[in-house]
Amino acid sequence: MNFKPGDFLFGIIDFFAFLIPGMVFILTIPGIGEKNIFDSCKYLIVNSTQKYNLPIEINLFSFIMLSYIAGHFIHYFSAMAFSWINTKTYQKYKYHEYKSFIDDAKNIIETKIPLQSKHLRAADAYIRVNKPELIPQIEKHEGTSKLFRSLALLFIYLCFRYPELPMIVKVGFIVFAILSFNRFAQQKWRRELLTYEYFVMLP
């Protein structure tokens, strides 16, 4: 049987954008993440299983669902915090660099799809209908960009979550936050450019 993108409710974007950041957050909540992330995981899944006499599968499922839900909130807040910064900085620079190609791609989109819609969204929909096997390549960059956008916020959060950490560690978290933001910006732009490139090449 041949599976297509979208055959599964849970995909690569959900895993990278929501589940991983949500797990990091859940495992560092005060009262759970007291020592390190491995002890926190043991506390949540193993110790609570023994304490409340529940099957470990139930606790594991609950942990995954809580992480997934928390990941959605982290995604929302990180989008509010960083997307507009990216639009005014990295994306603006890249648009200027690729202005001729992007303008030509948008003109082709308006010719092929004479509907009132955003260019990128229209191009994405066209690819999904006409060449769905290309979608995983696009979603790979989208999932990675959302993961690193959330990680940028989480690294900043960890600086405040553990105030007793040495200053060098906090500086490291800030550096990783900056690097995560940069990675997010690069992958977000790569996802957008790739969508336009695929669209232009399709008949």
Image: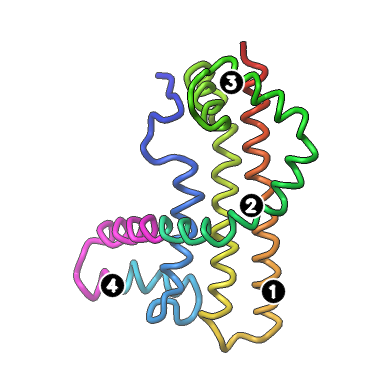
| Helix, strand or loop for disc 4 | helix
Q: Which of the labelled discs sits on residue 172, or is there none?
A: 1
**Which residue is found at the position 65% from the left and 59% from the top?**
180
Where is mark 4, residue-wise? 48
Q: Amino acid at mark 2?
A: Phe
Could you say which is closer to the camera, residue 161 or residue 121?
121
Evaluate if marks 4 and 3 touch, with contact meaning CB atoms under 8 Å apart.
no
Evaluate if marks 1 and 3 touch, with contact meaning CB atoms under 8 Å apart.
no
- The type of colouring in the image is rainbow
| Helix, strand or loop for disc 1 | helix
Residue 61 is one of the magenta-drawn residues = yes
CA distance for labels 1 and 3: 46 Å
Q: Earlier in the sequence, mark 1 or mark 3?
A: 3
Q: Earlier in the sequence, mark 4 or mark 3?
A: 4
Could you say which is closer to the camera, residue 71 or residue 196?
196
Q: Quadrant of the N terminus?
A: top left
Residue 21 drawn at (x, y percent)? 49, 59
Q: Amino acid at mark 3?
A: Glu
Where is mark 2, residue-wise? 184
**Which residue is found at the position 59% from the left and 32% from the top?**
137
Task: Point out the stretch of residues depicted in magenta.
Answer: 48-70
